[in-house]
Amino acid sequence: MRGKWQCLALWIALAISACGHVVTQISAEWKGGRPWEMEVLFDAGYAIPESRGDAQAPAQQRAWLLELGETGWAPLRQEAERYLRECLEVRSGGKPAEWRVDFIDFAKSPPNFVELLNDGAYFRMKITGVESLESGAEIAWREGTRPTFLLKLPGKQGGYLTLAPGQSQLLPVEENTVTGRAPWTESFREGFLHVLPLGMDHMLFVMGLFFYRRAWRPLLSQSLAFTLAHTVTLGLAAAGFVRVPGSWVEPIIALSVMVVALENLRPVGKSMGATRLGIVFGFGLIHGLGFAGALSVWIKPGHDFLPALLCANLGVEAAQASLLAAAWCLTAGWHGTPAYRRARLVGCLAIAGTGAFWLLQRVG
């Protein structure tokens, strides 16, 4: 019993100390050619050194980027190039390859910044090699506290390379030199990681569902309602039919975490199933927009749009099922005791408090 209480205390501590989403990866696409080219999608907010890595900093929107003007864009371009040269290295013939940077969106006036599903502030950087690469060339993402680097390889079946800090991979200098991870595998992986371990707000919402009632029927009905709702809005947003700024979505997600946890504290007899399912479904619609915002950088309309969307959603569902299964196993054997009822109360209050903290943080 002591061990279970310790696990619960650790989980609550992580929940209270956790914050919202941060930049977890930098996406790029390998174009190849002679000379070789690569296009990087850079988060403009991440080009501000003072707020880089600060989970409290709000995610900037495209409108903010448009309003900066040349005096605001110039330091962002300078810092983005400096940061990439610090982190990214292409090796050919056993030595670093030289490359230059062009900022694609600034070729027009006003700049033609990319429009993404989450309405985020991004600009594109074209990296062009000075010389052609030799066979066996590598790309390296240097060590340090930084996001992972996700590189899309050319062709319909090109796949992806994912580089954690300190890792390197062979580059497709010649056709079919590198196969990479299959696109559907990468989509599933990103969907799973968005919940476990990166999506703390979604994790707490799922735990709020678990603490409602530890019985398979309520858990299954809530899970299906949540899945149906966020699948609908994830699909609509990913297809471009719905676009809601993250400045609206993120506070409502925080509110959903708080409301679901507090609703658990109502007497069981008065907590009607239909009302509960309506609450879960309604907030599930908002969570779908949150998923779309997080996945929008690399899921775009195209020939592989539907498979990528399906696999990403399956990854999300697998992460939710894993979390519920872990909670079920952790509470097995003592869920009918007074100790569990106290632990459930503490857990709900911790979730509600964290949601309230995030709500104030994101509204402010």
Image (cartoon, rainbow, N blue to C red):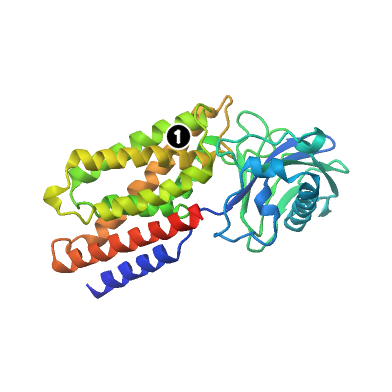
Residue drawn at x 45%, y 46% is 192
* Residue 350 in the image: above or below residue 267: below
Residue that extends furthest to the top in the rendered view of this protein: 303
Residue drawn at x 27%, y 55% is 262
Check disc 1 and report the residue beneath it: 234
Quadrant of the image occupied by residue 350: bottom left
Q: Is residue 310 visible?
A: no
Quadrant of the image occupied by residue 284: top left
The quadrant of the image that shows the N terminus is bottom left
Between residue 130 and residue 121, name the one nearer to us: 121
Between residue 157 and residue 332, name the one nearer to us: 332
Q: Horizontal placement of 93 versus 288: left or right? A: right
Whole-percent x, y for residue 83 in the image: 74, 56
Residue drawn at x 84%, y 43% is 129
Whole-percent x, y for residue 155 in the image: 66, 29
Q: Horizontal placement of 94 versus 217: left or right? A: right
Residue that extends furthest to the bottom in the rendered view of this protein: 2
Residue drawn at x 61%, y 41% is 160
